[in-house]
Image: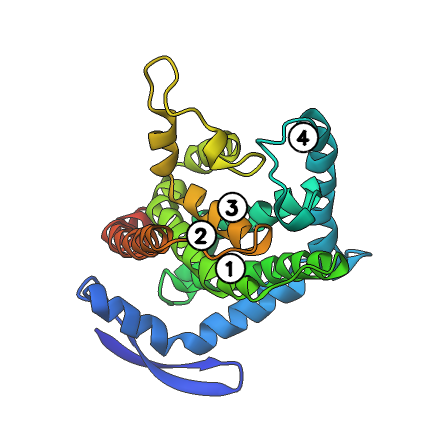
Amino acid sequence: MTESEMTFGSEQVRVFVPGRSLGFIGRFKELKQYKQFVIDQTRRKLQIRYNRSLLGWAWSLIHPLAILLIYTLVFGTILAGERNIVPNPDGLESFGHFLFSALVIWFVFQQVSTTAIGAFAESLMLRKRLYFPPTAPIIAGVVAGLVGNGVEIVVLLVAFLVVGSVSMTFLGLLFVVPLTAMFALGVGLVLAPLNARFRDVGHLYQVILRLAFFTTPIIYTADVVPETYAGVPLRRLLQLNPVSWMTEASRSLTFSQQWPNGEAWLVMSSAAVLSLCIGWYVFHRLVDDVVEGF
């Protein structure tokens, strides 16, 4: 392990450039040393995200609203007569609100996981010239992306304010969103080194995401899924997907305006912590070999 001085922004700090000797906890400590680097990279990603774009940051609003509009027109029309699919709590009949209350969580999961998978591969060329913890560009990319997700959550809040139906249960999103981000980050950390070596992983993940969208209760509620179909325990399989619990929790908090039960919080918390720990461990087990082979 060697010691060197580096400048991040206006701050000069003394850091250690390690080899493979850092352990599980040591990697966290190393990342903390490079916090200014992460901040600078996050700021840079936010600045260049919509560079040379006429609408700029407005795209953070246009993109989710366009998806919401399309899905509402398509699925809202198809499912218009299915009252068992679209519930009617407290007089709320807007399928758009019903849909967006779960889409917000899906956007968080999708953005965090795909960013984590791609950010590491994109940083390999820079890492040949400048040492930094391999997780630093991933964290920077995820944080920058979550800013866009924050815009989506604000849109959701404003939408419910317009119809005059907001309750204290909205505060539950302050827990569900971070838990979703933690779970997604763990998934991304597992796949990031594999994607850096085999770019097919990133393409395959996009296909899996599209399939997962329709097998997650977003355009429907979990309780309309049959217990079994052709001998397959569909409801049980759905419960094995942590994102299902998270989208249902978000819908309960914002659309139904009810607090999820204790089982839901336990499942979401356990899945988030377990995913992040496994992802952190697997990533650092594989990353050195990937970097050396690049």
Give the structural element (helix, strand or loop) at label 4: helix
Residue at label 2? Answer: 116
Q: Name the kind of residue labelled 1 in the image.
A: Gly
Q: Position of residue 39 (x, y in %)?
A: 50, 73
Q: Residue at x 21, y 63 (%)?
A: 24
In the image, is 217 to the left or to the right of 231?
A: right
State which tag comes first along the sequence, 4 or 1: 4
Residue at label 1? Answer: 141
Q: Nearer the viewer, mark 4 or mark 1?
A: 4
Q: Nearer the viewer, mark 2 or mark 4?
A: 4
Q: Name the kind of residue labelled 4 in the image.
A: Phe
Residue at label 3? Answer: 110
Confirm or deny contact between disc 2 and disc 1 (CB under 8 A): yes
Confirm or deny contact between disc 3 and disc 1 (CB under 8 A): no
Q: Name the kind of residue labelled 3 in the image.
A: Gln
Give the distance between the C-alpha atoms of the residues marked 4 and 3, in whole angstroms: 20 Å
Give the distance between the C-alpha atoms of the residues marked 3 and 1, in whole angstroms: 13 Å
Residue 111 visible here: no
State which tag comes first along the sequence, 2 or 4: 4
Q: Position of residue 151 (x, y in %)?
A: 65, 61
Q: Residue at x 53, y 81 (%)?
A: 9
Residue at label 4? Answer: 75
Q: Residue at x 35, y 75 (%)?
A: 32
The numbered disc on residue 287 is none
Give the distance between the C-alpha atoms of the residues marked 4 and 1, in whole angstroms: 32 Å
